[in-house]
Amino acid sequence: MRNADLVARDLKSVWHPCTQMKDHESLAPVPIKKGSGVWLEDFDGNRYIDAVSSWWVNLFGHSNPRINAAIQEQMGQLEHVILAGFTHEPVVNLSERLIEVTPEGLNKCFYADNGSSAIEAALKMSYHYWKNHGKPGKKNFVNLSNSYHGETLGALALGDVALYKDTYQPLLMEVLTAPSPDAYNKEPGETDEAYALRQFEAMDKLLAEKHDDICAVVVEPLIQCAGGMRMHHPIYHTKLREACDKYGVHLIADEIAVGFGRTGTLFACEQSGITPDFMCLSKGLTAGYLPLSVVLTTDNVYDAFYDDYETLKAFLHSHSYTGNPLGCAVALATLDIFRDDNVIENNRRLSACMADSVAHLADHPNVGDIRQHGMTMAVEMVKDKAAKTPFPWQERRGIRVFKHALTRESLLRPLGNVIYFMPPYVITEEQIRHLAQVATEGIEIAVRD
């Protein structure tokens, strides 16, 4: 089979996610035949470095032998079983391991199928907690401007990216929005920390005034990924944890995209020194292999639902594939690699290489910002550097970088005018420097006119 053959069949039958399908009249989807390590290979023999980890999920490379072996072993024993009234060894082992590695106090694991589903479960848990405590009036949620938490209706309501949300606004619950601590918007000479503290004042005021009506604050610690890989200082979440405790409001940490080493620590919350009331995990949980998500929460939350059946306090929420044994086995293999291979320390070397590889772009007249937390780095193209004036979104200049990168063995799928690296951790320094060179070439092409 050749690329063109599969593309022709694809366009007759497949509706791709997050895509204006008319774009494929001029830019065909790339058919992938196989993957190995950081490489994806198409049917015509072309290769691409997966610099975006196939939508931020792949941690240890495609077709990882250790993870493959874990799936094969589990397949021979148990592929799936209902988790209501039944249990199995992989889900128990995984729960124990997650409790061990996440912030102290997260002692219970509730499983779902994907990131959005985990957010939905956490929202319902928070509201139901307060209802079980005789406070049904606490039914509002607080988000941050430019946030993103998924595409199902509850998760979408918690987001604040107009491109995804505006069309469906009539279907969504109303939420309260506090200004983001996004350091891109700081004043000249202001530190990221100072700006985060200044932005927190609005959140503190909101909680002080409306905490009686608020269930929880939902945040993406350190990086607002779908919002353009915008980043902020961890002090914001330290202060937010204090305020949530003060005002009696839950803190939900959406670590779906930023967990499992993406920010330089295993979990982003570690850098703020906090334990949220709920931590939502997915994506890297299974290293890019299978859909699985989990909401970790505290004994205090769990105890609010623990009662006689007749009280109707139970959390009667479910998904067909909750706690799927195959997914759990993959997640356990993922945690084994973190444990055995000194991943976080090795990533510090790779992240330093990433920073050095694009340092020359700091003075580029059309680069408004270079930002990084650990193994996630972004370069933002702008029309005017001094004023940080963006290029009109309709010009889609990031796509020009994407098109060029495909000719240079690289998958660099942009977020608007933001070019970012979020590669698998098995990438080499040589491959990182290649990506930086390709990105530099692509930016020159993108801003040429």
Image (cartoon, rainbow, N blue to C red):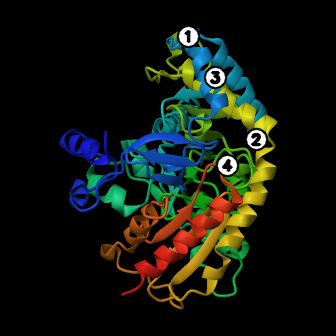
Relative to 86, residue 173 above or below: below
Q: Are marks 3 and 1 in contact (CB under 8 Å)?
A: no
Query: Which comes before the other along the chain, label 2 or label 4?
Result: 2
Residue at mark 1:
78
Q: Position of residue 403 (x, y in %)?
A: 39, 66
Query: Which comes before the other along the chain, label 4 or label 3?
Result: 3
Residue at mark 3:
70
**Quadrant in which the C terminus appears:** bottom left
Q: Are marks 2 and 1 in contact (CB under 8 Å)?
A: no
Q: Position of residue 232 (x, y in %)?
A: 64, 66
Residue type, mark 3 in image:
Ala
Relative to 124, residue 211 above or below: below
> Which of label 2 and label 1 is nearer to you?
1
Residue type, mark 4 in image:
Tyr
Residue, x 59% and y 56% (percent of image)? 422
Q: Nearer the viewer, residue 378 or 196?
A: 378
Q: Which mark is residue 103?
A: 2
Query: Which comes before the other along the chain, label 2 or label 1?
Result: 1
